[in-house]
Amino acid sequence: MRARTKGYWWYLAPSLVLFLAVIVAPFVMNVATSFTRWSGVGTPRWVGLDNYTRLLDDERFWQSFQHNVGLIVAMAIVPTALGLLLAAVLFDYIGRRFGARTAAALRAAYYLPQVLPVAVAGVVWGWMLHPSYGAVNEIFGLKLDWLGDPDLALATVMAVMVWFQLGYPVVIFMAGLQRVDPALHEAAEIDGASWWRRFWHITIPQIRPETFVVLLTCTIAALKVFGPIYVLTRGGPGNATMVPSYFSYLSFFQKSNVGYGSAIATVLALIIIVVTFLFLRVQERES
Amino acid sequence: MRAGPGRWAVLAALVVLAAVMLFPFLVVAVNAVKSPAEYGAEGPLSLPGELYLQGIADFWRRVDFGGKLWNSLVISGSVAVLAVVLSVLNAYALGIGRVRGRLWILVLFLVGNTLPQEALAYPLYYLSKEVGLYDSKLSVIIVFTAIQAAFGTYLLSAVLGQFPREILEAAAIDGAGRFRALWRIVVPISRPTINVLLIFFFIWTWNEFFLPLIFLISNDNQTVPVALGVLQGEKYMDATMSSASALLGIVPAVAFFLIFQRTLTRGVTVGAVK
């Protein structure tokens, strides 16, 4: 038996080599670089935890993680909550009263933004929100600089991300709802439970596994957000929409402060790994 | 069950939301085919009096959009095929071969897939310069093959873990070697899942922005999202040309969605039945 499984290692070999070269080694190098001062040329100089202590004092660093929290609201919490409601309404209200085709057409409309490359979604909204010729100001008769006003920029980016993200939970939850035993709903309906009560006591508990997956993947996506920030605001105005990924990109390629950028990226990686493990733990305990 | 006007109100609310979601697509399409003069006079919300394709044609020529499409196609296509091949090989060893330590290998792949690309970007940039691959399509292909294969391995290992053993044993008795069994039996039977992975890898790679932005700096190598993202805000991008560029970014994405939709739903349902 041992001999039989041994030969299978050859099938793993190409990937392990590739994985080592493209993911493991670069990640280790990134962590190592975060303990140095390095401009990208010459020899890195070891500075221990210096970059990390400087990070803790850096207002931009804290701001960028605060903005991340806003983006988690916009990309994970709001779309999940709204997605649950929409999926349930489409599935057992619209689907039953107006036909499955109507429900499917509405679902497709909500999903369409999700098929765009996120950078292209940024281009679309950069154009829609343009202060002088954009369609949004034209509709509302306003003259707002949506992305250029420090008080508005983050809220605007958040609204764009809700638009972009909403379709994903709707589609996942509607697929999940097909698992729910219709007898549960019928029994509750006979007992006189209102739609809201059934939504709260049957639908939501039944698609808990999907909810976990959606919350986890969307939270990670929000922590990693880069494309929309690059295209829409470049972290500005000032630092009004600065996020860790863009902050590290700036340190790497514009400020030539590679050690500092690596420290930001390392912290971001740690947060994402911790979030993933926390979610998986909670999920395990639930089931 | 409540009926009557209430249900129409619910439907109306959902239709309004759908209109809001689709509105940007509509406005972009309308203004991409509007002449700058008409745009100047009527603004973004009027319907174009005539079909004006010059804006799209100008933008296409200016940025060599055909070249960008080709770059995206080459990169995404290569990554999809290579990452699927690696995923199949890995999943064969992990799901069917059940090599020792497979749980740890899976965890390693999964963590690798979850890591933010920011934490790999600079070393990859540095290493690619060292080996002379910087600013080449090949560098992006190699990196994304590794990242996508990590996810594919995880998914496909679970599927192949359920693979009916009798079929493989029968093949072994017939004298089929391990590679023959993989190629002639496992791959054809797992076809639906493999197709779904191919499509996912293709679309995910097409949509990538961060690493391609770093690696593909010369015009000749840029992908569609990178070119559009970088050009946003250029001086010559007036209102109609900006909407033309947005439309050119939207069209391929929506086209893939329409082309692949049937395979995806079929693949997903086949997976669910199994």
Image (cartoon, coloured by chain):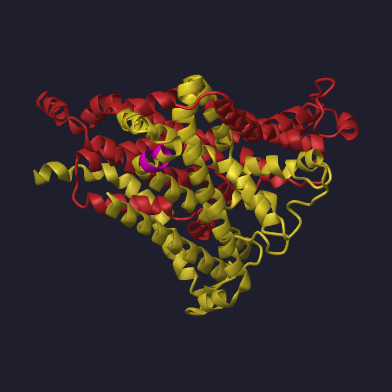
Chain colours: A yellow, B red
Q: Residue at x 68, y 64 (%)?
A: A239
- Asked if A266 appears above or below B263 in the picture, the reply is below
Can you give x and y, in whole percent of width and height, for residue A264 in the image? Answer: 53, 66
Q: Quadrant of residue A139?
A: top right
Start-end of magenta stretch: A198-203
Left or right: B65 in relation to A91: right
Left or right: A117 in relation to A279: right
Image quarter where the C terminus of chain B lies is top left
Q: Residue at x 31, y 36 (%)?
A: B88
Which sits in the foreground, B257 or B179?
B257
- Asked if B156 appears above or below B108 in the picture, the reply is above
Mostly what secondary structure, the magenta segment?
A: helix
Can you give x and y, in whole percent of width and height, for residue B148 in the image? Answer: 42, 43
Image quarter where the N terminus of chain B lies is top left
Which sits in the foreground, B39 or B203?
B39
Q: Residue at x 89, y 35 (%)?
A: B40
Can you give x and y, in whole percent of width and height, for residue A255 in the image? Answer: 65, 67
- Asked if A239 appears above or below B20 in the picture, the reply is below
Which sits in the foreground, B258 or A109?
A109
Task: Decide if residue A230 is in sight here.
Answer: no
